[in-house]
Amino acid sequence: MSDKKTYDLAIIGGGPAGLTASIYASRYNVNNIVISEFMGGLMSEATEIGNFPSYPKISGQELSQKMQDHAFKSLDGISKFGRVNNINKEKENFKLMLDNDEEILAKAIIITTGTKHNKLNIKGEKEFAGKGVSYCATCDAFFYKDKTAAVVGGGNAALTSALHLAKVAKKVYIIHRRDKFRGEKYWLNKAQNTDNIEFILNSNVKEIAGDDKANKLILDPKKEIEIDGVFITIGTKPSLNFNSNFDLDLDKKGYIKVDAGMNTNIKGVFAAGDVSNGSNHFKQIVTSMAEGSIAANSAYEYIQQDKEDMDYQ
């Protein structure tokens, strides 16, 4: 038999948007719970964050922990590790079914599920996942001490991943399909001036090969390089892995459409952070936090109005 708990607000996702939403909700005295498979979101994978106001330099894991401490220790937000499988609107509440069959009821929800890593979808990627294929240098770099690793991509994630790996690995390749990078000039210059980083440009990875573990990359134009591991950092896409009995409006790329108040097309459902099309798709920690605070304010006003309507009836 499933266990049911009722909250004013359920926040789905524990990245900067979700954690900020919880902080603001608690300060509004809104009973709230944050449900996430892992707290911190992709922020926690960042080796170094240098553009967060007040911290010239801080790791993603440290910043994530500070936000969690604020939300769940300093204030009254509740954290729950788990995945939401279904969301259904039932009369005055939303019912959330978790992967452990627990049911949570909430008057309003904020979706802050962020994004997930894109994949190359090439031969060997799936077969060697966790066996030399990774998507997080912060998580797995220590496996490559004095070894050779490759990073695929051309954005900030690729450049910072390569720099993080270069601190422990003997050799790091950056493989990019173009000769120009989307990443910031600061990170590019730093990578270009790191002795054990080598650039392979205008190349695509066609196959990841190996025996028990990945040990070779086959590139196009025709080239093979021997590696001990490869990190795929080619961007992200919105993470919406739950079913529901309502249809959220999404844009062409699958991001949740929101208005200035972070309202979706469904009354009582809000969205914030990288999963939304807010902030002109400028995916930053500070923009996610701003959206999380706005969503919490809108949810508070919705809950208050709902209570007033119930009292009037």
Image (spheres, rainbow, N blue to C red):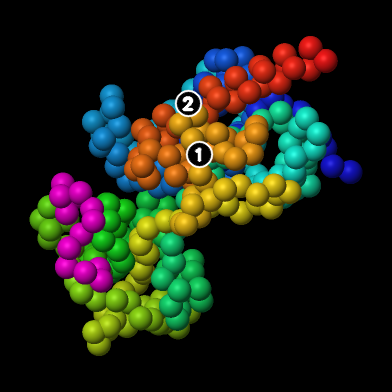
Range shown magenta: 176-188
Q: Earlier in the sequence, mark 1 or mark 2?
A: 1
Is residue 250 rendered to the left or right of residue 93?
Answer: left
Q: Nearer the viewer, mark 1 or mark 2?
A: 1
Residue to which mark 1 is pinned = 258
Residue at image point 25% right, 37% down = 50
Label 1, secondary structure: give it.
Answer: loop
Q: Position of residue 211 (x, y in %)?
A: 45, 83
Label 2, secondary structure: give it.
Answer: helix
Is residue 180 rendered to the left or right of residue 100?
Answer: left
Residue to which mark 2 is pinned = 293
Is residue 48 rendered to the left or right of residue 185?
Answer: right
Residue reaching furthest to the left: 193
| Label at residue 179 | none
Q: Identify the image quadrant of residue 63.
A: top left
Three-letter residue code for mark 1? Val
In the displayed structure, 228 sits above or below 43; it is below
- Asked if the stretch drawn in magenta spans residue 211, the answer is no
Residue at image point 38% right, 45% down = 281
Q: Position of residue 75 (x, y in %)?
A: 56, 18
Residue reaching furthest to the bottom: 222
